[in-house]
Image (cartoon, grey):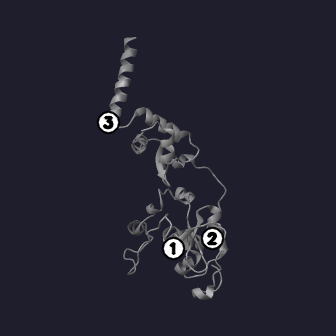
Amino acid sequence: MNNIIQLQEAAVESVEQNDVVSGVNTEHLRMAEALLFASGEPLDAKSLAAQLPEGADVPALLVELQKVYELRGVTLVCVADKWLFRTAPDLAFLLRREKPEQKRLSRAAIETLAIVAYHQPVTRAEIEDIRGVALSKGTIDALMEVGWIKIRGRKRTPGRPVTYGTTEAFLVQFGLENVGHLPGMDELKAAGFLESVPPSGFDVPAPSEEFAPDEDPYEGDEPEEVVDEGELDLPPGPV
C-alpha cells in the first residue's frame, strides 16, 4: 500500500516538475493534444483557443506538443497556418499502398503552377507574358480541378481580368505553412533548380496572400477577360 502511495506522489511530483520546466499547464496540454488528435481536419490557433479554457497559452502549448512528438511515430506540424498530426517523414514508407497511377500534370501546367505560386496575385495575361507562350484554358482548368489554384480577385485594369493564387490544398500538398515559406533563391540553387550564378537582374518574387493595392475580391458577377493574343505579341496557339 505504501508503495502505491509513493508511486502516486512521484507521479504528481513529476507532473509539477514538468509544469515548471515547460512553463505550460499540463491539463491544457492534454486537452490540446486530444483536440488535435480527434479533429478530422487541421485546426488553427484560434479554433483551439475557442475550445480550451480561458487563458490557455495556445502558442506555448503547440510548441510544447511539437517537442513531445518530435521523436515519435507521428509529429505535430503546421501547414497553411493550421496544425495537424502527421506520420513522421522517415516512417512514411510503412504506410505506402499500391495505388492506380494518377494522371500527371503537363509541363505547361507545372510551369503555370510555379508562376502562380511565386507571382500571385497574377492574371492569365501575366502568366503568358512570363512563360512567353499562349496558355490554353485547359491548363488553368486542370490546376483548378486538382484544387491547387483558385480565382482570388480582379485587377483594376481595363477588362477587369481575374487574378489567380494558390489554395490551402496547395500548401497542404507541399507541406508549406504559408506562401512565404516557398523556397527562396538559395534553396532553389541548392536543389539544382537555379544556376549557381543566375542571370543579371534575376530575383525570386515574394508572393502574398493579401490583396494587392490594385486588386478587388472576386465576386463572380462580371464576365471573364477575353485576351487578344495579338496585343500580347505571343506565338499563336495554346501550349
Q: Looking at the rendered structure, which numbered label has been put on residue 126?
A: none
Q: Quadrant of residue 188?
A: bottom left
Q: Can residue 127 be seen in this view?
A: yes
Q: Give the labeled residue for mark 3.
A: 21
Q: Which residue is located at x 64 percent, y 86 percent?
A: 236
Q: Residues within 10 Å of mark 1 (few under 14, many from 20)?
A: few
Is residue 91 or residue 65 the one in the foreground? 65
Q: Which amino acid type is shown beneath numbered disc 2?
A: Ile
Element type where label 3 sits in the image: helix
Q: Which residue is located at x 65 percent, y 63 percent?
A: 145
Q: Give the labeled residue for mark 1.
A: 214
Seen as rendered, the residue at the extreme top is 1
Q: Give the labeled residue for mark 2.
A: 140
Q: Which residue is located at x 65 percent, y 74 percent?
A: 224
Q: Where is residue 167 in the image (x, y as percent from the top left)?
A: 56, 61
- Name above or below for residue 15 compared with residue 122: above
The first of marks 1 and 2 along the sequence is 2
Q: Where is residue 98 in the image (x, y as percent from the top left)?
A: 63, 52
Which mark is in front, 1 or 2? Answer: 1
